[in-house]
Amino acid sequence: MNPTRRKFIQQYGALAAGIGLGSLVPEEGWAMVRKHLSPNDKIGVGAIGINGMGWSNLSAMLKNNPDVVCTAICDVDASVLAKRSSELEKNFSMKPVQYADYQKLLSDKNVDVVIIGTPDHWHTLMMIDACAAGKDVYVEKPIANSIYECRQMVMAQQKYNKVVQVGQWQRSHAHFQSALDLLRSGKLGKIRMVKTWAYQGWMQNIPKQPDAPVPAGVNYDMWLGPAQKRPFNPNRFHFNFRWYWDYAGGLMTDWGVHLVDYALLGMNAKDPLTVMASGGKMAYPDDAAETPDTLATVYDYGDFIMLWEHAQAIDGGNYGRNHGIAYIGNNGTLVLDRGGWEVIPEGKKMEAMKVQKSDDGLGNHHKNFIAAVKSRDMPSLTAPITAGATVATVCQMGNIAYKTGKKLTWDKSKQLFTDPSANQLITPAYHNQYKLPKL
């Protein structure tokens, strides 16, 4: 995006938001822009980390937003860069600049928005650096690998006033929204318990492998970033990073942030009073993973309790669904997952209901993000950084309860546990000369 277009977006968007016309900008505002600019003038997106969800996000953004063009891609694996570059040319007729260093991508004047699809331990530094560089950001969930980092990311968004959307795309599914409409109607009666779960039968064991040479074309030092220096091991690289504490939080923060997010959204809740967790490596006690393959977590919110359950290598979840959220009320239970929702009545207190998925949540989510980039209307974001921070913090609380083996009490006013040993796990250690961000 050239300086003229950027200035227009900022000025027009700020004006429109100020007078309550943010929703008009995508139609009227962009029509004004097109009168003065070439038809080829697009919003430039740069994607950092494009092997998994980073690629899914980039593809969804390009498919659903004709005003967006991919101008740059970045990955520490040269083979991934080459593969995605070829796919972009084939599928979208785009030839982005390739970077191995994300800082160089952030310095690219043709990059206006950034997608961060790296392992979790890199999200914080990259998001803050992107905002400081003047970029709007779409960051994958969970937003961070610690409670402290979540707080710093919220502060960075506020300091630099950039549009930041979190990849909790279920919020953009129409059937998830209609489920909340029913929940808030009061027809279910008082909700005393909310269950959330992910039973993932396809997640089998990870056999132990010896350390190995770094693959050709991989910048392993950059991949590690602030994580502890360790020899390269294939089990820790690409997708399986999720099962190692250095880089992520297991299923609790992987699937948990999606499902717990909707539990909290539906109950208008944030800070629990207490949290306790029990579980371990019960399916595959001797495999290579560190995070628990089986876990049950209980959050007490005073007037209701929330449960999180996960189990790898099992598909038989609650209500016959391998993942979901269940709001259990006096009159009936609302069960919701990515395929749709249903109401299971309590006797004859209400009618049974069923709704199926009918739209593209990920595509809708990227439309919402780009619309906010154009309008500068931050409240219009479906999953702002504050929402991402809330649910990531709650899920990190569950992991901390598991690690300490204690029932923990949370002091909302201090944003700390009452247990000193638990508080030691709020702030991560950064390594390899990287510094914890302070804002």
Image (cartoon, rainbow, N blue to C red):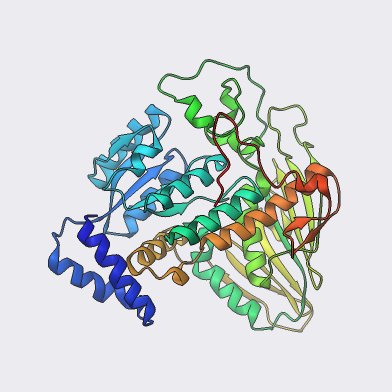
Image quadrant for the N terminus? bottom left
Q: Is residue 395 visible?
A: yes
Residue 317 left/right relative to 278: left
Residue pictured at 56% horizontal, 71% vertical: 355
How far from the left and from the top, in percent, is residue 109? 27, 47
Residue 97, given in percent of the width and then of the height, sits at 27, 38
Q: Quadrant of residue 43?
A: bottom left
Residue at 48% over, 30% down: 222
**In the picture provided, is 409 more to the left or to the right than 437?**
right
**Identity of the residue drawn at 66% across and 55% down:** 393
Q: Is residue 332 above or below residue 367?
A: below
Q: Looking at this view, is 183 or 109 the one in front?
A: 109
Observer-nearest residue: 397 or 233?
397
Image coordinates for residue 265, horizontal then vertical, percent: 63, 69
Judge by depth and name the residue closer to the eye, 399 or 354.
Answer: 399
- Judge whether 38 appears above or below 232 on screen: below
Please state the horizontal and vertical placement of residue 189, each as a whole percent of the image: 75, 81
Count every numbered label the image shows and give the total: 0
Q: Please tell me whether residue 273 is drawn above or below residue 57 in the rendered image.
A: below
**Residue positioned most to the front:** 439
Query: Is 402 situated left or right of 42 in this image?
Result: right
Using the rendered image of the protein, determine whether residue 338 is visible from the camera's viewpoint: no
